[in-house]
Amino acid sequence: MENNEELAAKAQRLKEILLDLAGKGPVCIAYSGGLDSRFLAFFSLRCGLAPQLFHVQGPHIAASDTAQAIARASDMGLTPTLIRIDPLENPAIWEAGKNRCYECKKTIFSTLLDQLPPGATLCDGSNASDLSVFRPGKKALEELGIRSPLCEAGISKEQLRAIGRQMGFANPDQAARPCLLTRFPYGFKPSEEMIQAVARIEEFIANHPFGKTLAFRVRVPDSDGPQLHIARASLPDRPFEHLSRLQHDLRDAFPNLLGLPVEILDTLSGFYDRK
């Protein structure tokens, strides 16, 4: 972990980038309500800017995530512009294989660019940690001229959290909630009903006494149905006792769910990239 001077230098660099963008026109942020875009909005406000937030709604985004994104923006005194986009309507996304995120980001950000006020710059919350993993969507952002101030300032996920703690940023340990399409294999087009079923199960687990501390995903890797993937590092003491209770409560809440096999993973993200 960098010392305070190094963190301060990166925070200063981020401020310079944002002020430079603001000198050219409105600063707009593709705002999911996740940690990265939320921090970027927070930091922009601390720099004296008035960022405009654009939040995408669609079948690939859980309704609860949108509600939380709006609430978190409101806590900062901001009101996101809501834009409806349905990736299920674009066949290129399903035909792209492992480049699914490239086609999806291209579709979404092209639409967002059309909504910007004159002279505005659209930013996203990608951070420097994203540069070390497979992120085909990043290529689409670069092609469209989307700015990634956190990346440009060299700020990693953990550095973002550390800077946020120093600045009084709310919930700097917020867990990641990727797009729901990532719960399905490349090349497979899920129905909206399937996506929403996964969203409901994940929401139930996230609000369960055991699930509140878990890093997890509900994925549907094959025709056998959903699986619960849990990051090993997030398991509590006596995990099987807790898992047994969770499985029992899931059966009560979802009578049609025949079972939810559990797989413990060392690395939660990139599951289908490893297949």
Image (tube, helix red, strand yellow):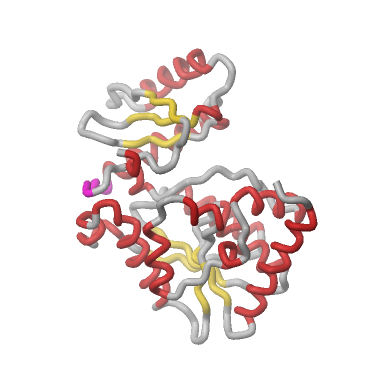
**Residue 26, percent across and down?**
57, 80
Residue 210 drawn above or below residue 64: above
Task: Choose top left, top right, bottom left or bottom right for residue 40.
Answer: bottom right
**Residue drawn 34% across the image and 23% down it:** 261
Residue occupying the point 46% across, 21% down:
246
Q: Position of residue 145 (x, y in %)?
A: 44, 75
Side of 97 where 71 appears, left or right: right
Specify whether residue 32 is painted magenta.
no
The span picked out in magenta is 187-192
Q: Residue at left 42%, top 62%?
A: 138
- 174 or 15, nearer to the observer: 15
Determine the residue positioned at 48% across, 49% down. 65
70 up-or-down from 239: above or below: below
Task: Farthest residue to the right: give it.
Answer: 5
Quadrant location of the C terminus? top left
Q: Position of residue 177 (x, y in %)?
A: 47, 46
Majority secondary structure of magenta residues:
loop
Does the segment drawn in magenta span residue 189?
yes
Q: Residue 183: x percent and y percent? A: 34, 42
